[in-house]
Amino acid sequence: MLDSAQRAAPFDRERLDEILDAHKGRPGALLPILHDIQGEFGMVDDAAVPVIAEALNLSRADVHGVLTFYHDFRRQPAGRTVVKICAAEACQAAGGRGLQAAAERLLGVPMNATTGDGAATLEPVYCLGLCSVAPAAMVDGRIHGRLTEARLTAIIEEAIR
């Protein structure tokens, strides 16, 4: 997991070139490259797209398509705390919409947004595999099931301290 200094690391062309070189010539290198870039910088900067495309002999549209298809790739820095609320059917049926509304009220932002102070990012996730203990959420990579609005609020408040 990235610390807060790494989450918003500026785009570094030299480090990007090192990541590209580490994967050069490997079949299917695009996804590992995108994962490594996000792991290093906390996001995949739009400025990296043409560099990646050229290195892999792909079009920018190809790279952009993969980057935008997978929900876990970020194009903007995340907050110090990342709150993902399950939006799959089982969680929705068990009260997931209430959890979403509680988190939005607590953080003061809608889904897919980051608080102005960078404390937290709130986003949906489309299945955590916890259907039997729905509703569920993930806060900074830790999963929580059988959530109530009060319990989720306490977990988020603890995480953003």
Image (tube, grey):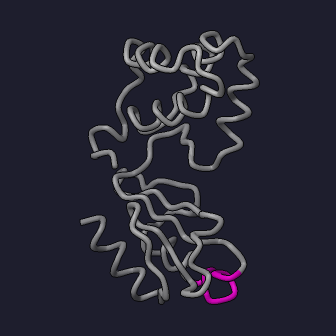
Magenta residues span 90-98
Quick check: 88 left or right of 33? Answer: right
Please tell me which residue is depicted at 27% across the width and 46% down the height of the picture.
3
Q: Position of residue 136 (x, y in %)?
A: 53, 78
Q: Is residue 83 above or below residue 96?
A: above
Residue 68 located left or right of residue 137:
right
* Image location of residue 134, percent across then percent down: 57, 85
Q: Nearer the viewer, residue 149 or 88?
A: 88
Q: Is residue 93 magenta?
A: yes
Q: Is residue 109 magenta?
A: no
Asked where in the image residue 131 lies, by quadrant, the reply is bottom right
The secondary structure that most of the magenta stretch takes on is: helix
Q: Is residue 154 above or below residue 109?
A: below
Query: How many numbered circles does the render carry?
Result: 0
- Tell me where residue 4 appears, x and y as whole percent: 28, 45
Q: Nearer the viewer, residue 97 or 22?
A: 22
Residue placed at 37% from the left, 26% from the top? 10
Q: Residue at x 50, y 61 (%)?
A: 122
- Quadrant assignment, res 96: bottom right
x, y percent for residue 155: 35, 77
Give the residue at x 57% y 63%.
110
**Image quarter of the C terminus:** bottom left
